[in-house]
Image: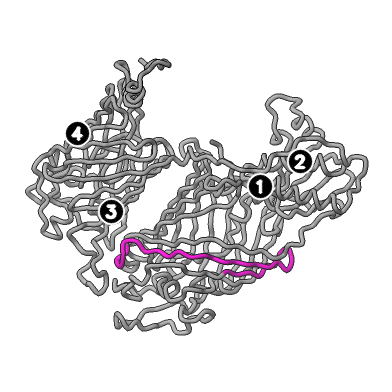
Amino acid sequence: MQPVMKISLSAITLAMLPIYQSYADEFSYPLNQPSQTDFGGVGLIQMPSARMAPEGELTLGATYNDEYHHYNVSLQLLPWLETTIRYTLVQDLLYSNDPNFSDDTKYTDKGIDVKVRLLKESYWIPETAIGVRDFGGTGLFDGEFIAASKHVGPFDFTIGVGWGYIGNSGNLTGDKRSSDDCGRGTDYKGKGGSFDIDRMFTGCSALFGGVEYQSPWSPLRLKLEYDGNDYKSDFPVTRGNITMPQDSKFNYGVLYRLGDWGDLRLSYERGNTWTFGFNLNTNFNDLKSTWLDDPAPDYHPGKNHASYKLSDEAWEQLAQDLHQIAGYEDPSIYADNDSITVVSPQTKYRERNEALLRASTLLANQGPQASEYRIVETSNYQPVTETRINAEQFAKVANHEEINTSVADVAQNQNPTTPQGTLYARSEKQWDYSFSPTLQQSFGGSENFYMFNIGVNAGANYWFTKHVEFGGSVYFNIYDNYDKFLYEVPPDGTDLKRVRTLVRQYINDNPVRMNNLQLTWMDQVSSNWYAQAYGGYLEMMFGGIGGEILYRPLGSNWAVGFDANYVVQRDPDSQFGFFKEEVQFDPLTNRNYRVQTGGLTGHATLYYQPQWNWIPNTLLKLSAGQYLTEDKGLTIDFSKQFDSGVIAGAFAAFTDLSSEEFGEGSFNKGFYISIPFDVMTVKPSTNRATISWLPLSRDGGQMLNRKYQLFNVTDARSPWYGRNAIN
């Protein structure tokens, strides 16, 4: 029943109206919405549930109590797949027993959780899911579970079976007399970060469950949980002799929703512990662009159709309008008796049909009479695609002569051809420059939990021809906390060449440094083949020579590339020098370490965009080859693109190094989010900002950071990074 507003409502009634409206009537309750656990991921309080957040939901969470501080990021990657990255600071333990190495940094656990939905809820069947907690961490919280959840009015009931940390009470199976974890073992494998499959679904198992109640007041939810853990094998207990008694098996929680962007959590756990937490959330599918853009031109052809010749001023105006209104930057324009051809990169619209509509309208309005418009999209002066539009058919679209037609219906994509006719307008721009803010960061290190540097990259390049470029960039460091590094070389016993762990010397000791200075040759060598060769200072830490070839059929969902490089590690004590001696000495650790004084690195890479309904809008990259520290192996990179164009991805490099040889973390891995500029600003743009998370920077599985990658350069052939939003 909805309140009826009348002009005669009293001031008191008006004041009470918002409170009254926040309650549902007697026939309905606010919709049940999934909420997060202390560990991140949808669930009850400590225990998970079978529920999933809406696809694309990103949640940043933090939870605090006397024993643990949890910081987590949860992303609903697919409708049936929930992923969580978590860092936990153990409050009563230090990172190491060597204060000269880790000072007072708290012991830090890094974990990855995954939950997969098996069944969707129906009238009789509960929603059912299976999941793994902390499968990519040090094993402090590792456990597995199967859970089922069922709505009954405002109540959401959950029951499940847990193993490991989730089922350590052993109320279902397991012999607690053998050990507190029923013989499962809570020590982490190797150097941590490994996938310890052998002990999954072993040890103690326990029933857990609970209920979440959505009150009539929509912001308020209450939780009651029966805990499957007894906390006798928690890390503070086994390693720090800290007591974590469990006075009650029941945990109680209250959650207050802060609109659509977050919530506050308070719980009373184990019968003796207060826990506070909060979450901030957004949805990548729902992010939308709001632009202050130049209006699209109206279609009114014919002004210049009496003559095939335009004045130089008219051609120049057409070029400027194509740049400003249609986003074809500094175009070259060719024309003959039959066609007008525009050759240019598209730098404004991810929605290519919008760019084509605007460009075709401008050509019809301001250009000479033609039967066809040809748009050759380039990248780094290399032709990538060609779109041919029949002028007569486009006129029907522009005049709305047919229902539900668009420029896409009259546009034909093909491999680019040589422009026909006379060149009437050409960009004289050979110089280019850029300024971009830069944030480099890592989490969970021994020296400090959060390590970062922020600065500005200033770049410039000059194209001698359409195939040869000379360019570089200088980094200006504004602030960093890399002075927290107490050792130049972490004393972890590894003997790898220090190709990345010397990062402090390059950043903290060089507030202004030359990042890149190289000569590049690039060409489309045949219809589907692209190539580049380069030499110079290739990145912050390496210089050398290299090359890449890429085979990418137009419109195909796959491509394959090969790159090979000979590199030498740059000397951080010299802007232009290189290490000459492989063996270096670190006075702080009083031991030697090795650097890369010359070696080969390169990979064969397969790019594949699956066409399967159960993993839509995804990109898989598989790269096999040799890395900077001369280890060999495979890097798997998987990313998902949401409706707004935001891309979330993860990578892992598996090489021939053992976990002991690699050091802490066992293998190289990381996560990233790539956000289109046009969802953050009020102007359309094809540029992106990338935020990356590295659990730990080590030396194994490290690739060269090349200035150009041909897959990115040729993106318009089958758009991934430049794909238009679909929300």
- Identify the residue at image location x=36%, y=79%: 593
Q: Position of residue 219 (x, y in %)?
A: 31, 32
Q: Position of residue 490 (x, y in %)?
A: 32, 72
User: Is disc 4 in contact with disc 3, using a CB cutoff of under 8 Å?
Assistant: no
Q: Is residue 502 left or right of residue 331?
A: left
Q: Which residue is mark 1?
A: 554
Q: Which residue is mark 2?
A: 360
Q: Which one is closest to the eye, mark 4 or mark 3?
A: 4
What secondary structure characterizes most of the magenta part?
strand
- Identify the residue at image location x=33%, y=62%: 666
Q: Position of residue 704 (x, y in %)?
A: 50, 66
Mark 1 and mark 2: Cα distance apart in space? 22 Å
Quarter residue 1 falls in: top left
Closer to us: 329 or 717: 329
Residue range of the region highlighted in magenta in the rendering: 445-473
Q: Earlier in the sequence, mark 1 or mark 2?
A: 2
